[in-house]
Image (cartoon, rainbow, N blue to C red):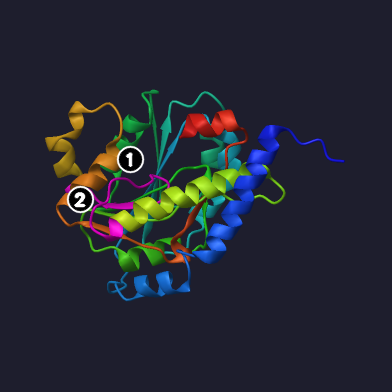
């Protein structure tokens, strides 16, 4: 007989509920994806700057950086901001990106992600900015192409960023359930024109609008730039949503409940 703890039974129950919920209510289904296709903008090859902020991420750089440098997009610039890493991050970045002409690498003293992101946006060549984290990977190497087709060169475009699915993991099932509920809430709200948040793991923004907003409001804030800019864009009817599964970005899941709570 299996010796399950109370916590194990709770997690198992949530996992079963998740399966029932999404069988009965598949909100990210084919119809949802088809609806997003109807609002595609004209596809072109306008330049995009992808920003990656890195602090002591040697492990994730080895695993995921290759996904980003091999994206299939004709006019891509990748801006890597090394936020004063003390491990082998910078060496790994140079090793993987050696010989690639479309890579910028900037090293700053460690001041936190907000400053690293500001640096990346300042250094970006193109007004169209894509954001993600280095512990993530795209669902397809056509990620940027899909995002670009739906971006209206204004405000921001919010994408979906679930955790990577792991088989036979009760903790992962719980996190998947929580993330999908959260994703359903903030994406549906954004579709209604009342966006209140997104995720920096899968976000596209228009640099001129971001700089204008930042000059007005953000210098007074310590954190929370992503969500506050999204709210500002929504108020000005400049916030769009993409559900196409080619645009999804998967995140490496936390390895413990404590880690998960800290991330939330």
Report x, y in % for residue 82: 43, 33
Disc 2 crowd, CA 10 A, few/some/many (<14, 14-19, 20+):
many
Is 119 above or below relative to 48? above
Dividing the image into 4 quarters, which one contains the N terminus? top right
**Magenta stretch contains residue 207:** yes
Given this view, does label 1 or label 2 mark the residue nearer the observer?
2
- The quadrant holding residue 27 is bottom left
Is 108 above or below relative to 120? above
Q: For the view shown, which residue lies furthest in the left direction?
A: 216
Q: For the view shown, which residue lies furthest in the right direction?
A: 1
Q: Say which residue appears at 40% left-offset and 23% top-offset.
A: 110
Q: Say which residue appears at 41% left-offset and 70% top-offset.
A: 32
From mark 1 to mark 2, how far is it between C-alphas?
A: 20 Å
Secondary element under disc 2, as helix, strand or loop, is: helix
Residue that badge 1 annotates: 120
Report x, y in % for residue 259: 56, 30
Marking on residue 233: 2
**Magenta stretch contains residue 21:** no
Residue 174 seen in the current view: yes
Q: Say which residue appears at 29% left-offset and 72% top-offset.
A: 39
- Give the extent of the magenta segment: 190-209
- The quadrant holding residue 191 is bottom left
Left or right: 234 in relation to 169: left
Dividing the image into 4 quarters, which one contains the C terminus? top left
Report x, y in % for residue 22: 54, 61
Q: Earlier in the sequence, mark 1 or mark 2?
A: 1
């Amino acid at each position: 007989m299996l010796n399950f703890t109370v916590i194990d039974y709770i997690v198992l129950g949530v996992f079963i509920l998740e399966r029932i919920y999404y069988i009965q209510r598949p909100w990210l289904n084919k119809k949802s994806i088809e609806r997003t296709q109807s609002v595609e903008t004209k596809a072109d090859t306008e330049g995009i700057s992808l920003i990656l902020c890195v602090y002591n991420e040697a492990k994730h750089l080895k695993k995921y950086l290759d996904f980003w440098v091999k994206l299939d997009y004709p006019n891509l610039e990748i801006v890597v901001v090394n936020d004063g890493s003390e491990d082998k991050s910078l060496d790994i970045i140079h090793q993987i990106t050696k010989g690639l002409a479309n890579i910028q690498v900037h090293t700053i003293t460690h001041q936190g992600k907000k400053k690293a992101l500001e640096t990346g946006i300042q250094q970006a060549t193109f007004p169209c900015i894509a954001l993600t984290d280095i512990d993530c990977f795209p669902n397809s190497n056509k990620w940027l192409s899909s995002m670009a087709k739906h971006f209206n060169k204004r405000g921001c475009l919010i994408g979906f960023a679930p955790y990577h699915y792991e088989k036979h993991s009760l903790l992962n099932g719980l996190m998947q359930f929580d993330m999908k509920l959260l994703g359903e809430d903030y994406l549906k709200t954004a579709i209604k024109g009342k966006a209140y948040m997104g995720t920096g793991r899968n976000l596209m923004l228009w640099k001129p609008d971001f700089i204008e907003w930042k000059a007005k409001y953000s210098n007074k804030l310590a954190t929370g730039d992503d969500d506050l800019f999204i709210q500002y864009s929504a108020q000005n009817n400049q916030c769009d949503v993409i559900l196409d599964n080619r645009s999804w970005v998967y995140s490496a899941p936390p390895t413990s409940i404590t880690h998960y709570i800290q991330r939330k």
